[in-house]
Amino acid sequence: GTKIEVAAGYHEVLQGPLILDRAILIEGPGDRDPLLIGEDSIIVAAGAARNRVILRRLRFRISGGAPAIVIVGGCTIEECEIESEGVGLEVAAHSGNAARILRTLVRGCEVGISLAGGASAAVIEGSHVQRCDCGIALTGLNVKEGWSDALSTFADVTMFENKTADLRIQGWSVQEKATGVVREAPPGEQVSVTGWPLEQSSVVAPTDRGPVVLHVEGGRVNATLWDDEEADEEPRSHSDSDRGEATSFELDTPERRKHSPDDS
């Protein structure tokens, strides 16, 4: 592949989309990182293998409303700074799991990181998402009833002052433990979690066979069935054998937060 070392303090205004369709490493020096400014996306489409494209110690500022970086193949974003009026980083549905976002700051975006390829679409480590409307938008969360590590690949992230949600989920499904039936989210529905990944949260998520409760705890999710005919009762909860304890569920309502012992 090609290696490009960009000088400290270098600025470039992009006149159109920048398409990276071959193996390449572009890196700054780590002091006064180079800045790329434009209105169109940087598109990474160099094949599915990991590290086909590496962007290291660079700054991106995209002002046209398009995603700053769109990843549709193997790509590592490392120690970069990303700002956009739209999405900061978008990991497309057919990128596999070859996208890695390491020690990177994403800020001031409508959506910081969009995982359109589902929960395993990207590995996020040591990164920060701050002052976005939504921190991470996840499309596609497929879990079984009970506990799973469904969010573990991207839970190593620090959220700060995101306006409406730290984590927003669309397109979820839950497989029932007893019957194997899969409950699916209605089209267009979404649920939002604040305080993630440091705080535990529970959200009621509608499905085509009645609501479920998703209890989010860092990289783990507990999916609990809540049948329509049991709407006035507590949802049934489950725990993994490796947890060694039962888990109780309460809805994350304003009244509960007001009286929560954690706030005292």
Image (cartoon, rainbow, N blue to C red):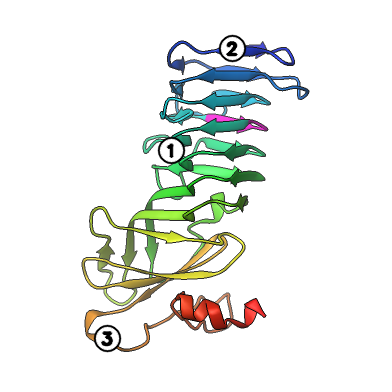
What is the three-letter code of the residue carrying label 3? Glu
Residue 12 against residue 144 in the figure, above or below: above
Which of the two labelled residues, at mark 3 and mark 1, occupies the earlier sequence position? 1
What is the three-letter code of the residue carrying label 2? Glu
Which of the two labelled residues, at mark 2 and mark 3, occupies the earlier sequence position? 2
Q: Position of residue 64 (x, y in %)?
A: 43, 25
Q: Is residue 52 a member of the stretch shown in magenta?
A: no
> Marks 3 and 1: which is nearer the front?
3
Q: Position of residue 255 (x, y in %)?
A: 47, 80
Q: Secondary structure at mark 3?
A: helix
- Magenta segment: 75-80
Residue indicated by mark 3: 230
138 vs 54, left or right, is left
Tally the marks. 3
Residue indicated by mark 1: 96
Q: Position of residue 129 (x, y in %)?
A: 58, 45
Which quadrant is home to the N terminus? top right
Marks 2 and 3 sit apart, C-alpha to C-alpha, by 60 Å
Q: Are marks 2 and 1 in contact (CB under 8 Å)?
A: no
Q: Is residue 76 a member of the stretch shown in magenta?
A: yes
Which quadrant is home to the C terminus? bottom right
Of 80 and 83, the residue lying toward us: 83
Q: Secondary structure at mark 1?
A: loop
